[in-house]
Image (spheres, rainbow, N blue to C red):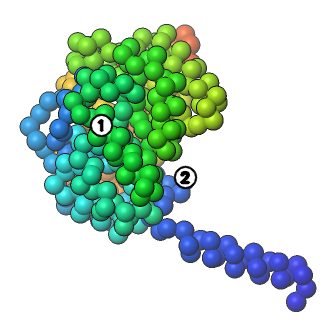
Amino acid sequence: MNMKNIFWENLKKNAAKEESSRPKGVALSSQGSFVVALTTRCNFQCRHCLRKESDVIDLPFEILEKLARSAKKYNFGHMSLTGGEPLLYPFFKEAVELIVSCGYSFNFVTNGYVFDKFSEFLLQYRKNLLNIIFSLESVDEASQDDIRRKGSYARLLEDFSVCRRSKLPFIIQSVITPLNFDELFNLALFAKKKGAQALRLSTALPCARTASNSLVLDSVKRGELFILLKQVSKILKFPVYYTAAIRSQDSVNLCSAIGVTELALNVNGDFAQCCDLADHDMERVRKNAVITSFKDKTFAEALKIISQYQHKFRCRRIEAYQSVKDPSDLDFNSCFYCINTLDRLEE
């Protein structure tokens, strides 16, 4: 056997070894993902929350099981769990066990207040855990507690310490409002010092609560935020990401939800346009955001309906491109566009 053949055989062996050692639950970049609202239960009443106030609703576990077992065939490989507070879902541990057993990676958003009850449990699923997303709005304890809940800052510090010791990956997410706009640099520096993988930024979206508290940044300030976060990331050599609430794509697809690569399931078992709109406190937006029920359909049937819906939405967006003066405007290429569009849709 010549050297070229030996090299080729070794290359194949190494590639096979690397593939076999990759955790089966880790999603590849080409795979689709789900954002699943597990419950409306929440132990906080945050000043910027866009969720409507409602009775306690928990996603039926059989709906989650149906989704997990039927969607893998269609190359969906990741589930992001949200709420409410997902750790208050009565079947949270069973949900994680199901998701992992079906070969998905997962992460979840949490305020961290009851995280200590789940840290040991999560250790056994660390290979499938992409990250834990902790919500922090300020590096100042009084400000954080005022925006979210008294004691939340101290509890998060304990959570970060547990994650560092246990090597549980986590990131910090902050909703930027006029209250913490000038904390951007300090938030990123704080996240880096506490061992977070990254800082992920969002911004308050229009809803009844944010309007009454004057927490929505205008387009000028959001444009400034978009520029500043890149500079902060560069200076600190630390990842600072942003969500579609701040800026999305300058294209017809707008975001992964419109591109049908990220699907949102609400607590009622309905597929919605995205997770932020699925339980929005503006009734018209919330109603128009629902695409189809999953309770009485197969995943294939639901996926067809979602694809048709998003096709119509993209066509509507093409028409909007014809009339908009500047497609790079943040109100046109962010979550603000969808909220404004859905609020104007006829019944």
**Left or right: where does residue 54 sit relative to residue 24?**
left
Q: What residue is rendered at 43% in x and 47% in y?
A: 170
Query: Is label 2 in a helix, a strand or a loop?
Result: loop
Looking at the image, which is closer to me, 117 or 223? 117
Q: What residue is rendered at 58% in x and 26% in y?
A: 232
State the residue lying farthest toward the bottom.
1
Q: Distance of mark 2 from mark 1, alpha carbons?
A: 35 Å
The residue type indicated by label 2 comes to Ser
**Left or right: where does residue 293 sit relative to residue 102?**
left
Looking at the image, which is closer to me, 181 or 320? 181
**Left or right: where does residue 219 sit relative to residue 155?**
right
The picture quadrant where one finds residue 52 is top left
Q: What residue is rendered at 23% in x and 47% in y?
A: 114
Labelled disc at residue 11: none
The first of marks 2 and 1 along the sequence is 2
Residue 11 visible to the viewer: yes
Across and down, in percent, residue 288 comes to 26, 30
According to the picture, the residue beneath numbered tag 2 turns out to be: 29
Across and down, in percent, residue 226 comes to 54, 22
The residue type indicated by label 1 comes to Ala
Residue 271 visible to the viewer: no
Indicate whether 58 appears above or below 177.
below
According to the picture, the residue beneath numbered tag 1 turns out to be: 154
Q: What residue is rendered at 61% in x and 32% in y?
A: 236
Across and down, in percent, residue 299 comes to 32, 57
